[in-house]
Image: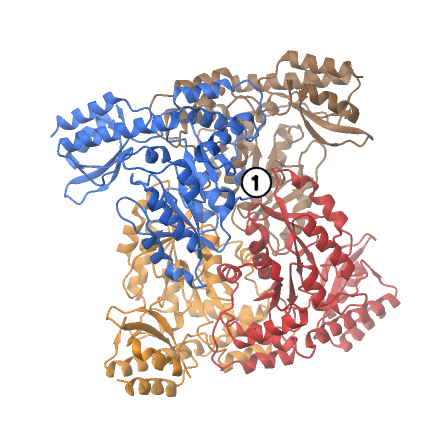
Chain colours: A orange, B red, C blue, D brown
């Protein structure tokens, strides 16, 4: 069975596991007040060239999103995001459950917002009977695999600030974004051109964990308390610190993401060579081939993947393949072969 | 350094770790929709003799508490609990952040509620300008180490139901309660005499995890969605399932808890033999000796523990020692020896 | 100055005021527990032919909307409504502030939902990572002046129920809907084909007040407590009861709404006769003429109204005129004359 | 029937009603954006000697409390108040429904907090697993009729600020406090020694309405939006402005409160002369006589009042009499006579 269902179908990279195991019987303070978390924070500040940034670890993306947003906004404020943004759909109303409206903006197939789209969307919200846009949420890579360039990010940052909004970047798939072809963004860029972003571990080699980086200027004094209040503090907090220390040592994080990208891109190219069309040309680890409906039952017997939705072409469906740190080249080859044998 | 600070200062029991490692490269569905979770659910239903109970896994006690309570209550309802209840203090207002008032009831040193205390506390809440008590929250073991008997639990259950409240039992330290001297409660009792309770893993040999058991009669149709909404769903959900499967196979869960109790009780007896007084005579893994303030700096050099508060006796302090699955007999002996050498 | 800005620009109809004044020094129980509220409830049940309906008074539409919705939904549920629905825009995120997502559905210029639109919109929400649609919100008259027929309402009711949703009808402008040309809905229809609806007083002759009618089958036991909790209970509750008693005696409510409709329709016809186009042909008290931008400054000197938005036709703007119980025929004539003299 | 049940059992003072009636057919902008509100704001700023204070009108105390508190606090913060504080009991969990914990502090029979009580109560809340105290809530007059002196208020203000809390004063019965014997507080004092307070109208001659005064230094930019979001904005906002303009012109507000106090004090003295004991010696319009249980049925036939609770003396009950702007001297005399004839 080829595993292309998601990038969280496997546990952790061996080096990450090893780091976790090494802590097992040390006897450590709880709640992240341990040396592993301290080292991971220090590594992240260094990599971001942001010595005063505040760093917090979360067990997953939804927790990171809702707690950060609740920490940054006042109760009359809302969040602007792409219609396809993760917080607008697949988090079961997590942001609204903190009391804040999500303002969805229709976007193109790459899932990216632009200053023009944002500017147009917030015009009616100047009215005092509407929520005040207080935060701009973007994802990199986006939910459809797109990536932001450094120039695009800077423009969105300026757009957000000139409209009194924070810019918050969901980095659940940040590794794949930063190692994709065409990317020119770096961690220091993210620390300069966002108010808050996170480095996603769950989808890039960790058992679980996202590392939120809050810029110095947006310090939220009660963020730990807020995280505790929302059930987001892991008692054995060092499990997150140790994993991030392992991931961020010697470039493992980027190496794993690069591998995932390479696997997806190889698969994408291989299928294109067979004449398969793609719903969107993603440079990252999520790819969206359009396949004949008749082929779906065959595919399902050999491969785990997700249905994305009906294609425009009759009797065709958009599906999603996702690669990860654990994807093997032989799986890619095998899957291409499967397509080839059913042309 | 003797480790008596808490029961979450160590990672997981080797058998639990082994179970986690075995899943690492299997390629599994996310969000708890995997065979390990299914097996753990099945084991729990069997152990509880509750084949229709709904079982959900959480990453920690605060998440389990707030999500269960939010799932069971209507917005005009509040939660009755002991003044010393975990949700009333150390969860940073988690229940209130879901919109529900916590109604604290003063209790004795064992931290236990009684039908009489509950009945008296809710009298004023019949007034329609006050919240309606909708849920009775208790802990077993309590925050001060006390345990409920089967008869006491049944009485509280009847008291709750005759007042239109759910009875919810926080089992963060359930293992130690069920294996304590004087305990006559069983898992099937808990499934009969509570509406919901959880089997705590974090404090009894797991890396993290609590298993909530909802009785058939209180099925909450949207609980998974609610858990997702509050950031409480682990993407790699099998990590919880595999751990609970390991813990609940061949009685490991009870064996670990019994060990923790034995270590604490041996320590308690040893210190008593040296003339040390205790703030409360806990039969579980948390014990509360009263020590002279002059001894504290010495103790701190050799042992991790927590200050509980000033004692009534002048110049004395109540401290807390907590044992766990990882406590070694030699640590107990060493600590008794340390006390003995400073009498 | 002609007053067409809104239908809440004037106080109350003289008979309503008189009823309020009559209570002034009687000495009455607070919070709605008085004979005036009891009489108004009784009148409403009679008019609705719903002797078991639960009736609650609110001070305004936003309070009625948010408290009813919070009372009906469970925390993982969301509200489906028209993109142009009042709760989706002009209530400053009131529904989201109760923790529930609003799911907006694009609709036509009449602002009306259909079973087809609803059915299509909720398809993706079957996914357990999304909120569960729990309530369908519609307005009659809609925010753009449209009205529902009895058949349409019944279909929406069936659509809602077959999808496990409540149907809730915002009746802020219900009087104008029920007395509009083309209407065939009655209060008993509303009591049969909605789970909850309200009879708006603020926009139809009262100082303030909306009367919520909850069908017997959807009794919400804690609704009074919830209303108190959200700051929605008026201490001198009889002020609402007395006003509704006056409005619902001898058909005053319908007489005032009919007058408002007649004034708006006369104005609409008069302007059409002058060649003015309308953005939407509303049969109720809100009308939406398209006027040349050059005419706006003239109009603003003589008339209070609102800008609705840019028209498709270049250099033209959609504006809104709203009539009320207090609109005088001479104002309508004068406004038509003003248009005529600037053709 | 003598009316001593509450100070909101009657409508409005004739001058207040007159002011409301005068606006009835003027045609005014909605939501408080009218000249009456502007004049009332101006009067309040003048009376408070606070030209930059932000003033907002609310329809009642619960709305004023919950919206102000939600506007001032961050999500991880809680509210410290007297155990007997209105927000801790009779608002049905309104503060908790905004997500904030209420931290009740046991107080004496006058219902007053002191810096010592506050300081002791917040000690455990320094722990990062507990909510952070962010606001100190007091009432003047208190729920049991007590009043604060200027020195006491200044001390609490300093105590609050030195602990990073706001000081918010619930002035539902502020008129009676400021005109009570022993009072030395003035409106300018309140503007200096609180961060926010309100001037209660509902219980002092208005149909409804509280005027919140936010000091310049605590400006909450989104307060109007927040009020709209919580259903607290009256569409016909001028109803509140006109009432406050009438109340605050020529000292009517203080005159009405002084009358209420005189009636209650005359009653209190008269009953004392008959040997009746009082649970607390209130100098304001709420008084708490202790009466034999056998007398209660007689009293109930002639007088509206509330049961406060059982007295310490066997077979006696504490009751509450409340006077208002509408209490007649003849009622006081009659009630004293009733007691006298049943000694």
Across and down, in percent, residue D172 comes to 57, 29
Across and down, in percent, residue D94 comes to 56, 42
Chain of the residue under the numbered disc 1 shown in the image: C
Across and down, in percent, residue B203 comes to 66, 68
- Residue D312 visible in the shown view: yes
Mark 1 lies on residue: C225
The answer to which of D227 and C322 lies nearer the viewer is: C322
What residue appears at the point 30 percent right and 26 percent down from the top-left corner? C259
- Residue D226 visible in the shown view: no
Picture quarter with the N terminus of chain D: top right
Give left or right: position of D294 versus B31.
right
Q: Which residue lies furthest to the left in this view?
A: C343
Figure disc tally: 1
Which element is circle 1 on?
helix
Give left or right: position of C308 versus A43.
left
Crowd tier of the residue under label 1, counting other residues whose Cα lies within 10 Å: few below 14, some 14–19, many 20 or above: many
Using the image, determine if residue C122 lies above or below residue D318.
below
Using the image, determine if residue B104 lies above or below residue D41.
below
Picture quarter with the C terminus of chain D: top right
The picture quadrant where one finds residue B1 is bottom right
Across and down, in percent, residue C172 comes to 38, 36
Give left or right: position of B123 versus A201.
right
The picture quadrant where one finds residue D4 is top right
């Amino acid at each position: 069975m080829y595993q292309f269902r998601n990038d969280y179908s496997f546990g952790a990279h061996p080096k990450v596991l090893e780091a976790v195991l090494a802590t097992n019987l040390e006897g450590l303070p709880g709640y992240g007040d341990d040396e592993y978390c301290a080292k991971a924070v220090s590594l992240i500040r260094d990599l971001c060239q942001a010595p005063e940034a505040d760093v917090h670890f979360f067990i997953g993306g939804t927790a990171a999103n809702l707690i950060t947003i609740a920490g940054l906004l006042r109760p009359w404020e809302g969040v602007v995001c792409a219609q396809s943004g993760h917080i607008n759909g697949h988090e079961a109303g997590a942001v609204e459950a903190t009391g804040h409206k999500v303002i969805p903006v229709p976007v193109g197939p790459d899932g990216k917002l632009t200053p023009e789209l944002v500017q147009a969307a917030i015009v009616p919200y100047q009215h005092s009977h509407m929520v005040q846009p207080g935060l701009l949420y973007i994802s990199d890579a986006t939910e459809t695999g797109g990536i932001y360039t450094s120039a695009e990010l800077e423009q969105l940052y300026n757009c957000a600030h000139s409209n009194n909004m924070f810019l918050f970047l969901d980095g659940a798939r940040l590794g794949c974004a930063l190692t994709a072809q065409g990317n020119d963004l770096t961690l220091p860029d993210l620390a300069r051109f966002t108010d808050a972003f996170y480095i996603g571990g769950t989808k890039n080699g960790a058992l679980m964990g996202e590392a939120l980086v809050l810029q110095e200027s947006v310090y939220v004094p009660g963020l730990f308390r807020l995280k505790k209040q929302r059930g987001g503090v892991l008692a054995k907090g060092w499990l997150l610190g140790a994993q991030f220390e392992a991931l961020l040592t010697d470039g493992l994080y980027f190496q794993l993401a690069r591998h995932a990208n390479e696997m997806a891109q190889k698969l994408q190219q291989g299928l294109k060579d067979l004449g398969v069309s793609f719903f969107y040309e993603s440079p990252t680890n999520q790819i969206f081939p359009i396949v004949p409906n008749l082929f779906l039952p065959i595919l399902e017997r050999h491969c785990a993947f997700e249905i994305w939705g009906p294609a425009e072409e009759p009797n065709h469906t958009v599906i999603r393949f996702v690669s990860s740190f654990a994807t093997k080249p032989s799986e890619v080859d095998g899957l291409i072969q499967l397509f080839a044998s059913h042309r």
